[in-house]
Image (tube, rainbow, N blue to C red):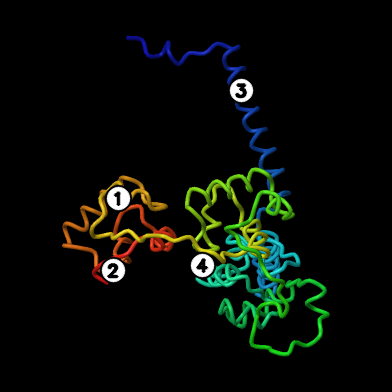
Amino acid sequence: MNLKSHFFLDSRQRSGILLLVLVLIACWGVYFLITPNASYESEALTDEELQIFEARIDSLRQLKLAESQPKIYPFNPNFITDYKGYTLGMSMVEIDKLLRFREKDQWINSAEDFQKVTGVSDSLLQTIAPYFKFPEWVTNSKPKASKTSFSYSEEKPKSDLNKADFKSLMAIKDLDEVVVKRLLSYRKKLGGFLEDNQLYDIYGISKSQVYAIKDQFTVQSKPYIQLIDVNAANASDLSTVPFITFEIARDIIDYRVLHEGISDLDELLKIDGVTSYKLERIKLYLSSNQN
């Protein structure tokens, strides 16, 4: 095997190799000539400069947080909804206290009244009270003789809700024909309302519409209701009670048999499908002979 032939180069090949070497040397020369002109050295920041950067970052975070917070506009605290109360920072218990208070046709006329009713903390009251907006006749009214009542000092007499007709209900500003017809139909189905809060059970009615009705009407003549004995009634009888379906009625009977009777109607909360809201209505039509 002739190894010498593998290393033998003619003049053209030697010239090519020489040219390639020169090009490589030129590239390396350009690299080392240009690279020093670019400064890659990083200067260490002083403590003072670090504090300035941190302060800027914190301020940007605060601005971002402030932009993400919902803006508060003046509002009447008597008409706070669940969502509005949540955005204000109120707990569900505090919101529920306010809603129950308003269901009694009572009104909040000051920040002090609001705190007494809801029990909100001083810090939260201080934050949201500046946004309270009451009617002008409340803010500019003369001093009341009694400061212990949160309700309006003068209340016009109300009409009987169970005798209200289509025309008188349509005269209420916030009501439309659909809601009025549903109210009359539901009242007929019940045989008459037993309490004002049954208005909330009407399909599609809003809280503001209930308030508008209760401002002018209230239950005065209650219909006679024969209470159904929860420990003796069959499923068909139980299912005639509002909010008790036939399935719930069968579950009540099963529970009654298993526990040898129902001594307290609050036990119905253990039945699947019975909530506290529904139980308040169910109690209007049921009784327990073991009470």
Element class at badge 2:
loop
Mark with earlier residue (4, 3): 3
Mark with earlier residue (1, 2): 1
What amino acid is labelled 3 in the image? Answer: Leu
Q: Residue 140 lies in what quarter of the image?
A: bottom right
Q: Nearer the viewer, mark 2 or mark 3?
A: 2
Mark with earlier residue (3, 1): 3
What amino acid is labelled 2 in the image? Answer: Asp
Q: CA distance from mark 4 to mark 2?
A: 27 Å
Q: CA distance from mark 3 to mark 1?
A: 103 Å
- Figure check: 172 above or below 215: above
The residue that appears at 26% across and 54% down in the rendered structure is 233
Q: Nearer the viewer, mark 4 or mark 2?
A: 2
Q: Nearer the viewer, mark 3 or mark 1?
A: 1
The residue that appears at 81% across and 75% down in the rendered structure is 137
Mark with earlier residue (2, 3): 3
Determine whether, in the image, residue 245 is placed left or right of residue 29. left
Determine whether, in the image, residue 266 is placed left or right of residue 108. left
Q: Which residue is mark 4?
A: 92
Determine whether, in the image, residue 94 is placed left or right of residue 224. right
Q: Residue 181: x, y in percent?
A: 61, 45
Would you call the spot at circle 3 few (<14 residues within 10 Å), some (14-19), or many (20 or more)? few
Mark with earlier residue (1, 4): 4
Q: Residue 50: x, y in percent?
A: 66, 70
Q: Which residue is mark 1?
A: 249
Q: Nearer the viewer, mark 1 or mark 4?
A: 1
Would you call the spot at circle 2 few (<14 residues within 10 Å), some (14-19), or many (20 or more)? few
